[in-house]
Image (tube, grey):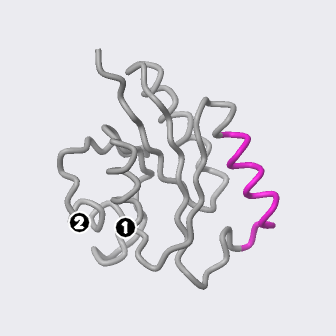
Amino acid sequence: MKTHNIMVCVTQQKSCKRLIEAGAAIAKEEDGNLYVIHVVKEGWKYFGKLKEADAIEYLFEESKKNGGDLTIVKADDIVGTLKKFAREKEIDIIVMGKSREKTADQDMIKRFRGKGLKEIELKIVT
């Protein structure tokens, strides 16, 4: 049986805990590996208003508690970086939160789908 690799895309919000937990549940069900990733655009703060160290520690603890590996990256091309990570880790399922953006240009899910990776299952947590 193939081991599935699950990627959870998180933001700077503490509500990302539910995304990590959803990804962990899928990883357990699929007997898979859990990868949690946060990509920050170059020049932006990693976690906005949250204190950097606290936010990083929170993500690390939630990832670890759920059996996942945490990766934090700074890059100009957020979607391209996520796509590259997914290919490198041979990701089968991507877990993301529902986008609240009003335009397709800002909607991360639509941008992600538009960049390829149609072979990877996308699970949206609401």
Vertical relation: 108 (above or below) 59:
below
Q: What whole-number distance in Å separates the C-alpha atoms at marks 1 and 2?
A: 8 Å
Residue pointed to by mark 2: 115
Name the quadrant containing residue 48.
Answer: bottom right
Instruction: Give the residue at x 35% y 74%.
Output: 102
Find residue 65 and report its horizontal and vertical position in percent: 69, 31
Find residue 19 and report its horizontal and vertical position in percent: 52, 43
Kind of residue at badge 2? Lys
Find residue 90 and report its horizontal and vertical position in percent: 33, 42
Instruction: Give the residue at x 25% y 44%.
Output: 120
Instruction: Give the residue at x 81% y 67%.
Output: 51
What range is drawn magenta here?
Answer: 49-62
Residue pointed to by mark 1: 79
- Assign the magenta stretch its main secondary structure: helix
Q: Residue furthest front?
A: 88
Find residue 85 and report its horizontal and vertical position in percent: 41, 55
Can residue 126 be found in the magenta stretch? Answer: no
Q: Residue furthest top?
A: 1
Q: Marks 2 and 1: in contact by CB < 8 Å?
A: yes
Vertical relation: 33 (above or below) 10:
above
Quarter of the N terminus within the rendering? top left
